[in-house]
Image (tube, grey):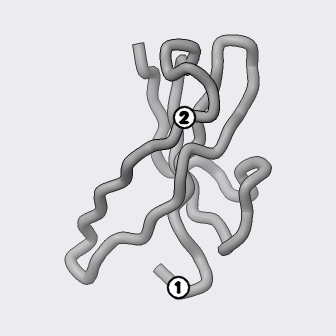
Amino acid sequence: MPPDRRYQVWLFTEDGVRESGDSFAPDAWGNAQVLLHAPAPFARCLAAGVSAEPLGNGESPSAPLAIDGWIR
């Protein structure tokens, strides 16, 4: 991944709100761990996704989701 980009975790709530969970960059072997900071009670989050974003992006995904799935 270029140094000016990070993977961004997005959380999608039951009322359609899309919130940034956190961003991360993989290590040299492609591994990463991220601790999510849910902006709303996590029980309201229905799905999550990850996109590759430029540094400083926090409003909404500017790239297609590379990974997505239901939480429940």
Measuring 45% from the left and 43% from the top, which residue is drawn there?
36
Q: Is residue 31 left or right of residue 25?
A: left
Identify the residue under disc 2. Answer: 38
Label 2: how many Cα within 10 Å (few below 14, some 14–19, many 20+): some
How far across and down, in percent of the image, does residue 68 sit?
48, 36
Vertical arrangement, residue 63 with respect to residue 12, above or below: below
Query: From this viewpoint, which residue is outermost toward the right?
Result: 59
In this view, the residue in front, 60 or 34, is 34
Measuring 57% from the left and 14% from the top, which residue is drawn there?
44
SS label for mark 1: loop
Label 1: how many Cα within 10 Å (few below 14, some 14–19, many 20+): few
How far across and down, in percent of the image, does residue 55 sit?
66, 74
Measuring 59% from the left and 76% from the top, which residue is drawn there?
5
Identify the residue under disc 1. Answer: 2
Residue type at mark 2 is Ala
Splitting the image into 4 quarters, where does residue 12 fall?
Answer: top right
Splitting the image into 4 quarters, where does residue 16 fall?
Answer: top right
Vertical arrangement, residue 68 with respect to residue 1, above or below: above
Instruction: Quadrant for the C terminus, please.
Output: top left
In this view, the residue in front, 58 or 69, is 58
Residue type at mark 1 is Pro
How far across and down, in percent of the image, does residue 24 sit?
45, 64
In this view, the residue in front, 62 or 8, is 8
Vertical arrangement, residue 35 with respect to residue 45, above or below: below
